[in-house]
Amino acid sequence: MKNIEIRKVDGKKGLKEFIQFRYDLYRNDPYDVPYLYSDEVFTLSSDKNASFDDCEADYFMAYKDGKAVGRIAAIINRVANEKWNHKTVRFGWFDFIDDLDVSRELIRTVEEWGRERGMTQIVGPMGFADTDREGMLIEGFKEYSTMYASYNYPYYPEHMEKLGGFEKDNDYVQSHVRVPEEVPEKFAKLAEMVEKRYNLRVHKLTRRELMKEGYGHEVFNMLNITYNDLYGFAPLNQRKVDQLVNQYIRIADLNLVSIIVDANQNNKMVGFGITFPSLSDAMRKTRDGRLFPFGWYHLLKAIKKHKVDTVDMLLIGVLPEYRAKGANALIFNDLIRQYQRYGFTWAEAMQQMETNDHMLGQWQYLESEQHRRLRCYKKLIK
């Protein structure tokens, strides 16, 4: 294939090259936000990431005339396959130059890898778990990316169309929402009614509750319930929950975390909203997503001093039996007030399934725009 050579990634040096490839490919793109390098190393290391308790994976690099021109990960999530009764191999970390021979050989490699392991379809881009980035950007190429969502060049989906056999499996949309000067009357009145009728309350966590009394773990245990029926979801194992709490929740500004409890059920947690000051501008100032020597300073300013105008709405979940009771209104009523207090102008709603009418319907009460669309593709392996 025109001097295209595919090599399996081996050892720490190989993994470093695999990770570095994307930074080099997007170095001059004005809309890309570099991913945090240490997070990439952690996620892709089988001896660190608890997702490997449920997954197996290999990584591959493409070379043309001896130069690195592409990369791809081949992943099998055994728990997801069992849950959805599929024999699916996932492809992820799929990046390549604008050369159809390169993308074709990378995809073919994953197909063969999956076929050897009894898989009958290939799906992606997807990661190990639902907390990893999913989807390929197909709309919104001239919108600033975020550290938590995928970004790619416009030629990526063009390649997917030309490769043949791939079709849409699922689309996500991402919305940009203006923080209102006043809480919308719909949210305020509904929140008041929900409190009175159902005795639901907003609870602001303390650091001790979060780390010592198990609330941080309860958030992700609840996520396993609230996200159970969403596309491709596989429950997070307990070791993965431990890692997510230690990596992310422990550094959260607890004013920007909203927990909903049912006072009639001994303050049982029934909903949550996890938000962070946007790290996009800070990451653009880092060198290849690295915190040293000066990257840590920019991230600290964003996380601790809120020197940004945007907040990222990372995770929102409500137990199914409490959705019709309006628990979502309590979350938004609380978070909007916190955003106003901190002076945020915009909120970035992380990607949501286009079929999730319940969540997408929340934005009708706010000034918002769906400005990015991402797609997961599927293809039968013959």
Image (cartoon, rainbow, N blue to C red):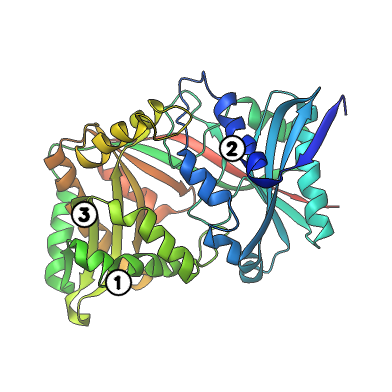
State the SS at label 2: helix
Q: Nearer the viewer, mark 2 or mark 1?
A: 2
From mark 3 to mark 2, how far is it between C-alphas?
32 Å
The mark found on residue 19 in the picture is 2
Q: Position of residue 84 (x, y in %)?
A: 63, 67
In the displayed structure, does residue 353 sit left or right of residue 164? Answer: left
Mark 3: few/some/many CA within 10 Å (<14, 14-19, 20+) = some
Q: Nearer the viewer, residue 348 or 279?
A: 279
Q: Earlier in the sequence, mark 1 or mark 3?
A: 1
Residue denoted by label 1: 214
- Quarter occupied by the N terminus: top right
Instruction: Identify the amino acid type marked 2.
Output: Ile
Residue denoted by label 3: 254
From mark 2 to mark 1, how far is it between C-alphas?
34 Å
Q: Nearer the viewer, residue 251 or 226?
A: 251
State the SS at label 3: helix
Vertical order, 249 against 365 (above or below): below
Q: Position of residue 294 (x, y in %)?
A: 34, 29
Vertical order, 243 against 179 (above or below): below
User: Which residue is pictured at 18% across the width and 42% down the height?
Assistant: 339
State the SS at label 1: loop
Mark 1: few/some/many CA within 10 Å (<14, 14-19, 20+) = few
Instruction: Identify the amino acid type marked 1.
Output: Gly
The picture quadrant where one finds residue 257 is bottom left
User: Which residue is pictured at 27% across the width and 38% down the height?
Assistant: 300
Q: Nearer the viewer, mark 3 or mark 2?
A: 2
